[in-house]
Amino acid sequence: MLLFLVSFLVMSTTVFGYDEKFNKIDVDKILADDNLLMAYLNCFLDKGPCDKEYAQDFRDILPEVIATTCGKCSDIQKDKVRKLINSLINTKPDLAMELKTKFDPEGKQEEKLALFLTSAK
């Protein structure tokens, strides 16, 4: 029985969570380099190629990440998403609004996202 529970927990993380490769994204590096940040944002907004590390992969899951308020994210991924979005809101509010308009045009996730952004682990 214990073996079954351990197996289930391991499989649940694999099946129901996002790939661990997203844990390796260096958000600080992206935020420190405006050209790199803009390359990612242009990818997410369909304004440019998705040729940076994991950009296309993250772009593909971004609608679900927004819709579920990072519901499948690991704690590490949640911290990275919080840091990135909060930084965008503070430093590039126009681009933050553009992302919101693209991925939550009706504002359905606005309240949940605000709570998520101010919460800690």
Image (tube, rainbow, N blue to C red):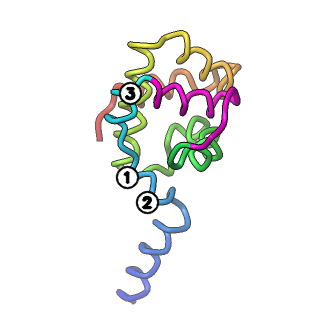
Q: Residue at x 41, y 80 (%)?
A: 5
Secondary structure of the residue carrying numbered label 2: helix
Front residue of 5/107: it is 107
Residue located 46% across and 49% down the image: 73
Q: Nearer the viewer, residue 39 or 99?
A: 39
65 lies above or below 48: below
Q: Which mark is residue 24?
A: 1
What amino acid is at disc 1?
Answer: Lys
Q: Is residue 11 above or below residue 73?
A: below
* Nearer-the-camera pick, 89 or 7: 89
Residue 63 occupies quadrant? top right
75 with respect to 108 (left or right): left
* Residue 67 figure quarter: top right
Q: Which mark is residue 33?
A: 3
**Type of residue at label 3?**
Asp
Does residue 1 belong to the magenta stretch? no
Mark 2 lies on residue: 20
Q: Which residues are magenta?
A: 35-51
Number of dots carrying numbers: 3
Mark 1 or 2, which is nearer the eye? 1
Name the residue located 34 percent from the left edge and 25 percent from the top edge.
118
Nearest-to-viewer mark from 3 and 1: 3
Do callouts 1 and 2 mark residues in contact (Cβ within 8 Å)? yes
